[in-house]
């Protein structure tokens, strides 16, 4: 599952690094070529909603493998795209794959791991995404220097996704659903009802979207901030990006251990709040190294939030984990789109300080929402604000697993 999460990132890394090269190939500006990522994100959001239905009908392993196959097909098609429209269509297929792989990897944790080991498993899966940036960026750059962006799709993105597909086929157990489980899935929309009638689950989704929006202040705008405000070179800015990925990775890895000591909800609240505070502040320091310290700490705490929040979300509706995590993936994609848009608008009107403030506050708002409106079902069996949470019990959870 770690390699599966690793394998869906190369298309995004590749386009992030080589948009200029792709644009030159098709005679398009960077702004136009960049829309392939926008369309891909939109496709991922809508298909994640459909996954809420498919996850009720089909096995999580089968859906995860289908997603990896789609990512492989996308990489192959992109490498042979003859024009921009073909590239747009080919790259959009990877959005379908991502919408299947990410939620099914988390849902599989609920099937194959005991309750106390799930946070660590989720932390490792989140680490797979971060490590993909650390490993993929230099490899893609090296391949591009020898054979161009097409070879990077064919020689890196495709083999990685095929390797993940093979490992998933061989390594993931197949869960056989009994007659009782099949009867409970009579309505494809039962999962949506179970999720949206649970106020705590809804708050988790909104909180995850806000956290995702917050981190766009780092992912999308931090490199430009350091290049324009401190006049650092492009090469040095790329090193800052790698450093940020390392801190995010560290946060995602260690968060599982803190979940056991502090708890899913308290850790989500604390790290989301601290992440938002540091992201608000990183553009305000006149000193480069103080700014970097705040930026890296913001990434560290958001990395911890990603593991803790996914652990909390996974347990909200144990009988509909596939639907819950599919909705969570859609919320994350919508949050990324929201953050990029709001941050860009704030940057135009209020400069970088306004951008960081508008997005960092979203992380603080997420912390407040997690604190006031969510409950950890593994700590209490009833929740006065949620109709669905009263149906949870350890026995139900074990029977689903």
Image (cartoon, rainbow, N blue to C red):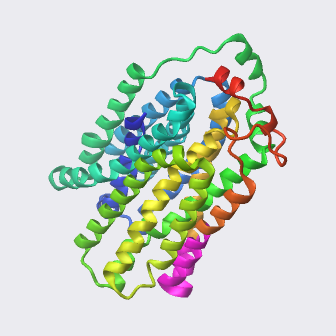
Residue depicted at 70% across the width and 40% down the height: 377
| Quadrant housing the N terminus | top left
Q: Is residue 190 above or below residue 132?
A: above
Q: Observer-nearest residue: 313 or 5? A: 313
Q: Is residue 322 above or below residue 253?
A: above
Assess whether residue 311 is covered by the magenta stretch. no
Q: Observer-nearest residue: 69 or 317? A: 317
Left or right: 311 as drawn, with respect to 135: right
Left or right: 140 as drawn, with respect to 189: left
Specify start and end residues of the magenta stretch as a single range: 342-362
Q: Where is residue 42 drawn, in percent x and y?
A: 58, 53
- Residue at the far front in the pictured view: 261
Q: Is residue 43 visible?
A: no
Residue depicted at 39% across the width and 28% down the height: 165
Left or right: 167 as drawn, with respect to 326: left
Q: Where is residue 315 drawn, in percent x and y?
A: 64, 38
The image quadrant of residue 218 is: bottom left
Number of residue marks: 0
Q: Where is residue 398 drawn, in percent x and y?
A: 64, 23
**What secondary structure prevails in the magenta region?**
helix
Q: Is residue 280 visible?
A: yes
Q: Where is residue 162 drawn, in percent x and y?
A: 34, 31
Residue depicted at 63% across the width and 44% down the height: 313
């Amino acid at each position: 599952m770690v390699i599966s999460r690793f394998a869906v990132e190369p298309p995004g890394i590749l386009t992030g690094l080589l948009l200029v090269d792709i644009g030159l190939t098709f005679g398009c500006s960077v702004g136009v070529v960049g829309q392939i990522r926008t369309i891909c994100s939109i496709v991922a959001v809508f298909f994640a909603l459909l996954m809420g239905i498919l996850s009720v009908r089909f096995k999580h392993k089968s859906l995860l493998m289908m997603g990896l196959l789609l990512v492989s097909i996308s990489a192959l098609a992109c490498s042979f795209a003859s024009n921009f429209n073909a590239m747009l269509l080919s790259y959009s297929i990877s959005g379908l794959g991502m919408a299947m792989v990410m939620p099914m990897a988390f849902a599989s944790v609920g099937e194959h791991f005991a309750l106390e080991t799930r946070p660590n498993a989720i932390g490792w899966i989140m680490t797979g995404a971060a490590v993909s940036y650390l490993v993929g960026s230099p490899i893609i750059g090296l391949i591009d220097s020898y054979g161009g962006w097409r070879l990077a799709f064919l020689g890196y993105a495709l083999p990685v996704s095929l390797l993940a597909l093979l490992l998933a086929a061989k390594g993931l157990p197949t869960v056989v659903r009994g007659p009782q489980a099949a009867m409970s899935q009579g309505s494809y929309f039962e999962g949506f009802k179970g999720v949206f009638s649970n106020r705590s689950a809804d708050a988790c989704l909104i909180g995850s979207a806000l956290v995702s929006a917050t981190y766009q202040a780092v992912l999308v705008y931090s490199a430009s901030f350091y290049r324009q405000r401190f006049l650092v070179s492009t090469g040095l800015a790329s090193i800052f990006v790698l450093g940020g990925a390392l801190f995010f990775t560290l946060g995602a890895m260690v968060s599982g251990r803190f979940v056991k000591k502090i708890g899913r909800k308290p850790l989500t609240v604390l790290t989301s709040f601290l992440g938002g505070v540091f992201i608000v502040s990183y553009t305000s320091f006149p000193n480069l190294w103080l700014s970097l310290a705040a930026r890296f700490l913001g990434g560290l705490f958001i990395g911890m939030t990603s593991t803790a929040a996914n652990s909390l979300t996974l347990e909200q509706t144990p009988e509909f984990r596939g639907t819950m995590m599919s909705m969570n993936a859609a919320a994350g994609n919508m949050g990324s789109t929201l953050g990029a848009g709001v941050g860009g608008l704030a940057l135009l009107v209020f400069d970088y300080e306004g951008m960081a403030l508008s997005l960092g506050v979203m992380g603080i708002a997420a912390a407040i929402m997690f604190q006031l409106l969510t409950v950890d079902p593994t700590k209490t069996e009833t929740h006065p604000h949620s109709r669905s949470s009263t149906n949870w019990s350890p026995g139900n959870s074990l029977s689903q697993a």
